[in-house]
Amino acid sequence: MPKLYLLLGGNLGNRTLYLQQARESINNKVGHVTQSSSIYETAAWGKTDQPNFLNQVLEVETDLLPEQVLQSINAIEQELGRVRLEHWGSRVIDIDILFYDDVVVQTQRLTIPHPQLHLRKFTLLPLAEIAPELEHPILKESITELTNSCPDQLKVWLYS
């Protein structure tokens, strides 16, 4: 069964509750969640004048195809109240596909691996916690190597 890595994030409302609800929905509608990273907090990336984000990475075994995963996670975001008003804006939940096995997808709607994951410490740190040796199928570097060379200077810390 293919292994899928998803990044969950949000910065509005009860952030931990939204992450929990997203995890449960993913487990019910996308596939079996086999690993969950710790929850990390970081200042907003891209559009910085907004509340801090909480982020978590999940490893999921799924029998869905990549496009079906995208449809499912978009539906979960909607069910949890996500409203897309602006690029990189505040949100109750965001679910991004980071990897789907070592598959590379480049369509108008979907790019796998996530095109900016190697530039974002808030993505790499939780991913490195659960899959440090995972190799990026395009960059041919492990998550640990990508984390060590990441240019992102935003502070990322464990949420407590």
Image (cartoon, rainbow, N blue to C red):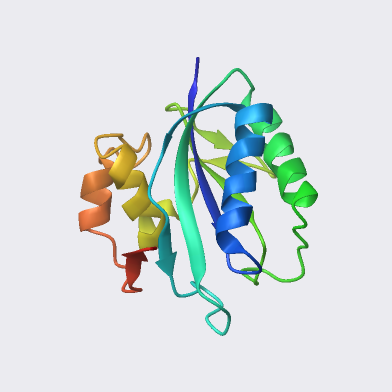
- Across and down, in percent, residue 92 comes to 67, 62
Task: Tell which of 11 and 62 is nearer to you.
Answer: 11
In x, y percent, where is residue 114? 50, 47
Side of 63 where 143 appears, left or right: left
Q: Is residue 154 left or right of residue 66?
A: left
Q: How many marks?
A: 0
Q: What residue is rendered at 52% in x and 73% in y?
A: 46
Rendered image quadrant of residue 107: top right
Image coordinates for residue 142, horizontal then vertical, percent: 25, 40
Residue furthest toward the bottom?
49
Q: Is residue 77 above or below residue 82?
A: above
Identify the residue at image location x=64%, y=57%.
93
Q: Residue furthest top?
A: 1
In the rendered image, the vertical position of residue 56 relative to residue 29, given as above or below:
below
* In the rendered image, the vertical position of residue 29 relative to residue 159, given as above or below: above
Q: Is residue 38 above or below residue 70?
A: below
Taking the image as shown, residue 139 lies to the left or right of residue 95, namely: left
Residue at image coords 60%, 17%: 63
Q: Nearer the viewer, residue 68 or 10?
A: 10
Q: Nearer the viewer, residue 80 or 144?
A: 80
Specify the quadrant that holds the C terminus: bottom left
